Image (cartoon, rainbow, N blue to C red):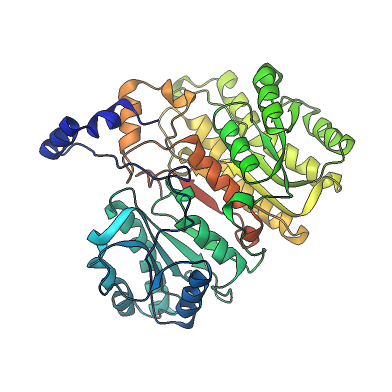
Amino acid sequence: MADAYTRFIRTAVGRAIAKQTGLPRPPRLLRAADRTEPLLGPVVVLGTSAGADELAHTLLDWGADVRRRFDELRRVGSVIAVLDEVDAPDQLGEILLPLSSAMRSLVPGSRIITISRPVTGEDLARDAARGGVEGFVRSLGHEVRGGGTANGILVADGVALSSAPVLGALRFLLSARSAFIDGQLLRITADTGTAPRDDLHALAGRTALVTGAARGIGEAIARTLAGAGASLVLLDVPAAGTELARLANELRAVPVQLDVTAERAPTRLVETLRTRGLRLDGVVLNAGITRDRMFANMTADRWDPVIAVNITSQIRLMDALIDAGDVLGDQLRVVSLASTSGIAGNKGQTNYATSKAGVIAFVDALARRLEPLGGTANAVAPGFIETEMTARMPALNREVARRVNSLQQGGLPIDVAEAVAFLLSPPVGGIRGETLRVCGQNIVGR
């Protein structure tokens, strides 16, 4: 599904022109359909801590070809730099610099992962070192070539590197399912969750609701969750009833035609779940709209619907589901769709950016509310994704949006869907109130 420029630049003539002119040369991203291996080997684990040794043994149990040095390796698939015991900035180079000489040995689609601890405000030198890891990851994300990525996992003090949420995050970031995630740091705050299962059955036995499911990213999410073994309840507006019914029949899901902004929508959803005897283990709040306009020309008929659909409906639905008490499972996972516009803003999208920034704050608050119930909430913030909506952008704006990220291309709906599936999985109970950007490390925001 490459765009016209990318298809041309990958031809012999296009490559020659790009080399001479310095034009972007988007790499081919290897997604799950392109490689089924859970990780690319050999895997080099850097670091001398007990946590590094433990992770190396875990990777061996996963069947990986694990090394502790780059010696005699002509090709490298994955690198994990374990920095959990770094106490001062001058200790970073000892662990990280060996990677510099191996950068040209990385295979296409390679993965570099740092594992470190977050800043706590308790020790100046230690916090400086921990904070420095973020700058390293974000910069390295811009340098990895061949469709490779660099990301980090921040593990709270007291949480073991062998815990379920750490291993679940590591398995996801090492896999092809994270192809459009680059330069990001995923925070783990608690040792809560169950051990990761193989990707093909990660959601087996779990039931999930997806709103806005009939088309686009919502459809991709539904298909991905069904492929991971989940049973589905698919919700969309009555106007999308034909597409919703078709998808529900294909995936053997329960269709619900409902306008999420309607006064009785939350009540009707609860009634439907009770009538069918369903308990939700996952909720994906994907329904969303845009009504772009410069703020000088903004009117209520463009502002109010965006706020109503994109954030107010989410609050009302979750309030109703939680208050019902009998329609949610014990390890509930909620994932809401935010946007990089909600992080950095976007010209002509004050209404949309307001709603999506609200989503980011909402999942943080919701995670706190769900914690005593054994659940959690997180958000996924897509960048430029190739959808029907972005296809309607002016051609020049669309082309610029594709190139202003480390991977120099737009993402696909499947990229967002894979991140959602990961955040719905049992291991991620220790990931709470986070917003995971799926943007290829877009230059806007963080």
Quadrant of res 294 = top left
Q: Nearer the viewer, residue 342 or 150?
A: 150
Tell whether 141 sits left or right of 56. Answer: left
Q: Quadrant of residue 286?
A: top right
Query: Number of labelled discs?
Result: 0
Q: Position of residue 76 (x, y in %)?
A: 32, 63
Please state if 366 lies on the left or on the right of 143 as rendered. Answer: right
Quarter of the view holding residue 104: bottom left
Up-down relation of residue 9 to residue 69 (above or below): above
Kindly identify the residue that appears in the image at 71 percent across and 27 percent down.
249
Toward the right, the furthest residue is 275
Image point 87% across, 40% down: which residue? 277
Asked whether residue 31 appears in the rendered view, the answer is: yes
Location of residue 399 with respect to 325 vertically, above or below: above
Q: Position of residue 140 (x, y in %)?
A: 31, 58
* Residue 120 in view (yes/no): no
The relative height of residue 414 versus residue 171 in the rendered view (above or below) is above
| Outermost residue, left side | 20
Give the residue displayed 49% in from the left and 56% down from the top. Answer: 38
Q: Residue 195: horizontal and vertical position, in percent?
A: 64, 64
* Depth order, front residue of 350/157: 157
Residue at point 87%, 38% (across, down): 274
Quarter of the picture holding the N terminus: top left
Name the one closer to the observer, 125 or 389.
389
Q: Position of residue 387 (x, y in %)?
A: 47, 28
